[in-house]
Amino acid sequence: MSQPRNRWIVQIILALAVLTFVGVSVVPIIGAINNTTSSNQNPASPSTNSAASEQKTKLQDTVRGYELVLQREPENQTALKGLLQARLQLLSLKQGNIQGVIEPLEKLAKLNPDQSEYGVLLAQAKQQIGDKEGAAQAYRTILDTKPGDLKALQGMVALLLDQQRPEAAIGLLQDTLTNAAQANTIQPGSVDVVAVQVLLGNVHANQKRYPQAVSAFDQAIKKDPKDFRPVLAKAMLLKEQGKAAEAKPLFDSAVALAPAQYKDEINKAATATPAPAPAPVPTTESTPPQ
């Protein structure tokens, strides 16, 4: 399959794989950009324009109010959060720019090192303006103290894949798995080994390294046979390869294992029109260098 379709499949599985609080972190930035794009494509009626104009005026007043507070109290977190939210809303209305979001995010990330959501949002914002090194540094800042943080891991992996650096993504995840036992001894539950293995499998799948992907998923299934995530990931990979018959029992198993809120989405994935099978993969494919 084409690279865009592979990436779409990867993102769907990644979202489910981390049971996803990532949406909370990414949606404000991505949603604002997407809303801007869609509003450019859909002309608004006069009444809609009037309402939007009023909303912009109110939001601009709100921004000025928070800016005045922050001139007196630069670390006032209520004002910083309010400013961030107002600027995000303006961004969705095609007002302002991503740089205006980065400023309060940098302060909030610094003031709340234990809340990685701010760092992830900051990385997303920097990636939006093309500052990929700044985005990577934001992710590294989180991972230096929380190597198992799934939001940061997923974001960093996606960034590395976007930079055409799959080996770096694989190395990051393998290092995380290698150090997981020690990290979980120091802080139990700090690294979700199954989720990281699923991420690793999906990077391999993204690169069409199907045997390695299946191996990663199988290791995750062995690690926790009651976890639906690697079962679903393997099922979707097999279906993407045109192996619907092999995928079906895995989809059935994933549905049985999954929490109720995920069952409908898994059933939809199982019954969606299968993609054409990709070209055969050589059975003697070598292990990528680390």
Image: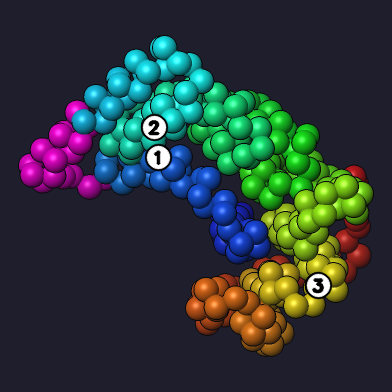
Residue 82 spot, x, y in % from top left: 39, 32
Residue receiving disc 2? 82
Residue 148 spot, x, y in % from top left: 76, 48
Query: For the residue carrying disc 1, how many other residues have a C-alpha within 10 Å: few (<14), some (14-19), or many (20+)?
Result: many
In the picture, the disc for residue 66 is none
For residue 215, above or below residue 252: above
| Disc 3 element | loop
* CA gap, disc 1 and disc 3: 38 Å
Which one is earlier in the sequence, the residue at label 1 or at label 3?
1
Q: Quadrant of residue 205?
A: bottom right
Amino acid under disc 2: Gly
| Disc 1 element | helix
Amino acid under disc 3: Asp
Closer to us: mark 1 or mark 2? 2
Quarter of the rendering occupied by the C terminus: top right
Side (left or right) of 61 relative to 151: left
* CA gap, disc 3 and disc 2: 42 Å
Q: Is residue 85 visible?
A: yes
Residue receiving disc 3? 224
Side (left or right) of 47 relative to 136: left
Amino acid under disc 1: Ile
Q: Are marks 1 and 2 in contact (CB under 8 Å)?
A: no
Residue 36 spot, x, y in % from top left: 33, 40
For residue 114, above or below residue 289: above
Which one is earlier in the sequence, the residue at label 3 or at label 2?
2
In this view, the residue in front, 7 or 224, is 224
Magenta-colored span? 41-57
